[in-house]
Image (cartoon, rainbow, N blue to C red):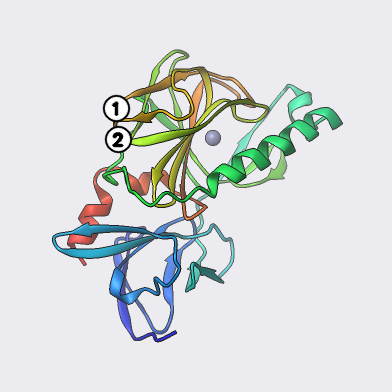
């Protein structure tokens, strides 16, 4: 692989990262780089044209330690980031210590979701400028280390938006509905494919108003806020996936992507 010194802008810190022979990224963040500085051979990556130039956007895996990973034949050096921690208590013990039956169900559902997250569609439907899907309060940010009843659990890899039961959830961007379900953890759930490895999911809804196979516009009602699945109160658990990695959804809000590209 022929590489050279190049500049990358990592929007997580909104500063320039200089890298020699490797692409630098921040845990759970995204990397935006000019397409001609990336190895794109056989790569299923997200690319976006802006003012006549092509750019690539990678999702960076979440890591608590410095790590080097290979994403679509590109070497990415991950810097850890401290996203803080959250502690919650769940009184329904059947949803903390799972019965064999629930464990089997949760495992099967996780495999179904994982299979769909691997979707790569050639056409980008999204404008990459997401709107917050619910008019509510951000109640838990992305990346927090979690403790449930004081027991360490996997980090929170999504953005929680709290709103009253029944509040509308709107598609933050155009996409195709590729999975709808009612899952043990996620409750009433929908997964959208925005194209080129960019996907978003919506959990804990009280009602889902879309069906698999529907192509929806930005602003279409996906469903209603609820407390289905494993939750402590009504909220939307909103996940953004890029090249199969869960990344911080806030990076796609407020036209951050285009602002970053225009500063490269
Ligand atoms: Zn959540």
Rendered residue at 48%/71% (across/down): 76
Q: Is residue 243 left or right of residue 123?
A: right
Rendered residue at 36%/73% (across/down): 38
* Ligand 1 within 8 Å, label 1 CB: no
The foreground one among 95 and 87 is: 95
Q: Which mark is residue 114?
A: none
Q: Which mark is residue 131?
A: 2
Rendered residue at 44%/60% (across/down): 44
Q: Residue furthest top?
A: 166
Within 10 angstroms of label 2, few (less than 14), some, or many (20 or more) residues?
some
Label 2: state its secondary structure: loop
Mark 1 or 2: the one toward you = 1
Label 1: state its secondary structure: loop
The x, y position of residue 217, in whole percent, is 30, 30
Within 10 angstroms of label 1, few (less than 14), some, or many (20 or more) residues?
some
**Would you say the residues marked 1 and 2 are in contact, meaning their CB atoms lie under 8 Å apart?**
yes
Rendered residue at 79%/34% (across/down): 103
Please tell me whether residue 219 is drawn above or below residue 45 in the rendered image.
above
Q: Earlier in the sequence, mark 1 or mark 2?
A: 2
| Residue 93 occupies quadrant | top right
The x, y position of residue 106, in whole percent, is 72, 34
| Residue 96 occupies quadrant | top right
| Residue 210 occupies quadrant | top left
Looking at the image, in which quadrant does ligand 1 appear?
A: top right
Q: How many marks?
A: 2
* Ligand 1 within 8 Å, label 2 CB: no
The foreground one among 157 and 69 is: 69
Please tell me whether residue 240 is drawn above or below residue 54 in the rendered image.
above
Q: Is residue 236 left or right of residue 15?
A: right
Q: Which mark is residue 219?
A: 1
């Amino acid at each position: 692989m022929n590489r050279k010194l190049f500049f990358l802008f990592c929007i997580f810190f909104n500063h320039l990262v200089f890298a020699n022979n490797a692409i630098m990224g921040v845990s759970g963040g995204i990397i935006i780089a000019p397409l001609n500085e990336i190895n794109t051979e056989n790569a299923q990556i997200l690319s976006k044209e802006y003012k006549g130039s092509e750019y690539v956007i990678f999702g960076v895996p979440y890591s608590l330690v410095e790590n080097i990973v290979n994403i679509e034949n590109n070497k990415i050096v991950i810097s850890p980031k401290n996203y803080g921690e959250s502690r919650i208590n769940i009184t329904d013990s059947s949803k903390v210590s799972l019965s064999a039956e629930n464990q089997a169900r949760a495992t099967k559902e996780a495999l179904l979701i994982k299979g769909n997250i691997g979707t790569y569609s050639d056409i980008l439907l999204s404008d990459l400028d997401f709107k917050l899907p619910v008019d509510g309060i951000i109640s838990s940010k992305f990346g927090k280390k979690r403790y449930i009843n004081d027991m360490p659990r996997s980090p929170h890899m999504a953005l929680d938006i709290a709103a009253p039961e029944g509040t509308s959830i709107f598609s933050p961007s155009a996409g195709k509905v590729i999975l709808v379900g009612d899952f043990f953890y996620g409750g009433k759930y929908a997964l959208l494919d925005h194209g080129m490895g960019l996907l978003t999911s919506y959990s804990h809804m009280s009602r889902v108003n879309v069906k698999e196979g529907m192509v929806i516009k930005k602003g279409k009602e996906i469903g209603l806020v609820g407390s289905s699945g494993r939750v402590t109160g009504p909220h939307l658990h909103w996940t953004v996936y890029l090249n199969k990695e869960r990344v911080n959804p806030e990076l796609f809000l407020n036209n951050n992507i285009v602002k970053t590209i225009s500063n490269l």
